[in-house]
Image: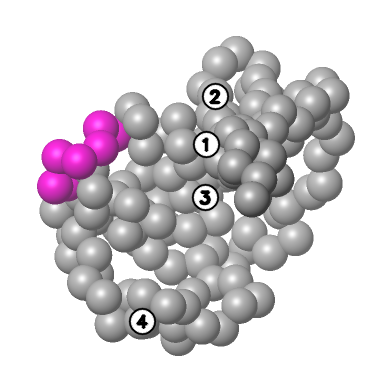
Amino acid sequence: MPLMLSQVVSGRMTITHYVKMTSLAPAKAFGLYPRKGALLPGSDADIVIVDLDRETVVDSADLQSKGNSTPFQGWVAQGAPIHTLVRGRFVMRDGQLCTDAKGHGRNIRRVQQMPAPTPQNTHTTTAAILAKAPQR
């Protein structure tokens, strides 16, 4: 996330576009919208507060996930999440996981069907290119 925030700080992306890419679009793609991916009445209050002035260095030892490596090891990023709320409750405060948040997660069901997959760039597939190739 901090590397994408660097794009916001540099002006290559707006914060609105960043929110769409990281929150709204995935929630819609997985059929979780509007419960997830929006701040609307009846939606879960999932909020991340970021500090766009904070500079961080990507370090795999700091990752809070099952994966323990990153191709971005040592990269400097501008902007970092400082607080995270899930369903209105702090799970990260001042960059540190809250110990009382353990067990706060829960499985959710899709509120709608996932949209049907739509093939993209079908004109550039190997089959399409070979079909247009002149026969010798």
Q: Amino acid at mark 1?
A: Ser
Task: Specify which label sits upstream in the sequence, 2 or 1.
Answer: 1
Question: What's the distance in space between the residues labelled 1 and 3, CA to CA?
Answer: 18 Å
Is 77 a magenta residue? Answer: no
Residue 47, percent across and down? 48, 38
Would you place residue 44 above or below residue 56 in this image? Answer: above
Residue that mark 4 sits on: 73
The reply to whether the C-beta atoms of the residues labelled 3 and 2 are less than 8 Å apart is no
Residue that mark 2 sits on: 38
Q: Quadrant of residue 117?
A: top right
Residue ranking furthest to the top = 41
Residue that mark 3 sits on: 90
The reply to whether the C-beta atoms of the residues labelled 2 and 1 are less than 8 Å apart is yes
Q: What span is colored magenta in the figure?
A: 9-15
Determine the secondary structure under disc 3. Answer: strand
Q: Amino acid at mark 3?
A: Phe
Residue 42, percent across and down? 66, 17
Question: What's the distance in space between the residues labelled 1 and 4, CA to CA?
Answer: 24 Å
Q: Nearer the viewer, residue 56 or 98?
A: 56
Residue 44, percent across and down? 64, 30
Residue 93, percent across and down? 42, 58
Is 10 a magenta residue? Answer: yes
Q: Quadrant of the N terminus?
A: bottom left
Residue ID at (61%, 37%): 132
Residue ID at (54%, 29%): 24
Task: Specify which label sits upstream in the sequence, 1 or 3.
Answer: 1
Question: What's the distance in space between the residues labelled 2 and 1, CA to CA?
Answer: 8 Å
Residue ID at (28%, 82%): 74
Determine the secondary structure under disc 4. Answer: loop
Task: Specify which label sits upstream in the sequence, 2 or 4.
Answer: 2
Q: Nearer the viewer, mark 2 or mark 1?
A: 1
Q: Is residue 60 left or right of residue 115?
A: left
